[in-house]
Image (cartoon, rainbow, N blue to C red):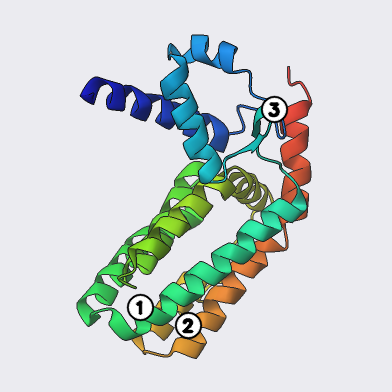
Amino acid sequence: MAKQESNVSRVYEELRQMAADFAFMPDQRINESELSKRLGASRTPLREALNQLVAEGFLTFQNNRGFFCRSLTPKYIQDLYEARVAVETEALRLSVRRAEDSEIAELGAYLEQTEAEYETADDPEARLGMDETFHMRLVRLSGNSELERALRSLNDRIRYIRLIDLKRMHDKAATRVPGELSAHSRILMALAGRDAEAAEAAMRGHIEKRREAATEAVRIAFSQLYVPHD
């Protein structure tokens, strides 16, 4: 039994990464026979993993047709951003009430350590990793594990587009005005001041600013997925 559970876990993790990275084309039907051979997995653990990914929103299932990769459209990405706003603003309101001063100080120390590196990093994945870590730690201060779980799922499903957006920002040399507070700093200051309204406004503005760029990021994503590169 332990070996079977381990195999299901392995197949799930590999499939989840493939789905997150759009190794399957958007709306593409998944060939279970080919996938089984590719992953060296029998039908049962493969099916269990596929069904789990459907439940998490990475894949879809159609009766009598099988499993499909999720869509990649501006509407889908907008939905993810709207869900992220809902999750993070609610978590922030809870954090204002529940977080210990020492926990807020620890997050402030992390932000201070990483902000300079974030501004100068050439690797979009490194920048995204720092951003996600800050937001996950912020949600964790709410003490609500379900909100934390929801944000992790949203992050994984939106990561492909966010990487494109970050690369585009870097190519445009987008930087803050010297002395200007970062969005993360504004959020943290409001949290430390126990100002729920200011914290929510800062978080909402921070996320929605990037949501506005989603349509262009989706267009770039399609060009990367479907246009051959030499």
Residue highlighted by disc 1: 95
Location of the C terminus by quadrant is top right
Counting from the top left corner in percent of width and height, residue 111 is at 36, 65
Q: Could you tell me if the residues under marks 1 and 2 are in contact, i.e. CB atoms within 8 Å?
A: yes
Q: Which of the 4 image quarters holds residue 19?
A: top right
In front: label 1 or label 2: 1
Residue highlighted by disc 3: 64
Q: Give the mark nearest the N terminus, 3 or 2.
A: 3
Residue highlighted by disc 2: 199
SS label for mark 2: helix
Image point 37% across, 26% down: which residue?
8
Image point 65% across, 33% down: which residue?
69
Counting from the top left corner in percent of width and height, residue 169 is at 65, 53
Counting from the top left corner in percent of width and height, residue 108 is at 32, 71
SS label for mark 3: loop
In the image: residue 12, left or right of residue 30: left
Q: Could you tell me if the residues under marks 3 and 1 are in contact, i.e. CB atoms within 8 Å?
A: no
Q: Give the mark nearest the N terminus, 3 or 1.
A: 3
Viewer-side residue, 12 vs 116 = 12
Question: Which kind of residue does numbered mark 3 sit on?
Answer: Asn
Asked if residue 144 shows in the view, the reply is: yes
Mark 1 residue crowding within 10 angstroms, few (<14) / some (14–19) / many (20+):
many
Q: Give the mark nearest the N terminus, 1 or 2.
A: 1
Image point 79% across, 26% down: which residue?
227
Question: Which kind of residue does numbered mark 1 sit on?
Answer: Ser
Mark 3 residue crowding within 10 angstroms, few (<14) / some (14–19) / many (20+):
few
Location of the N terminus by quadrant is top left
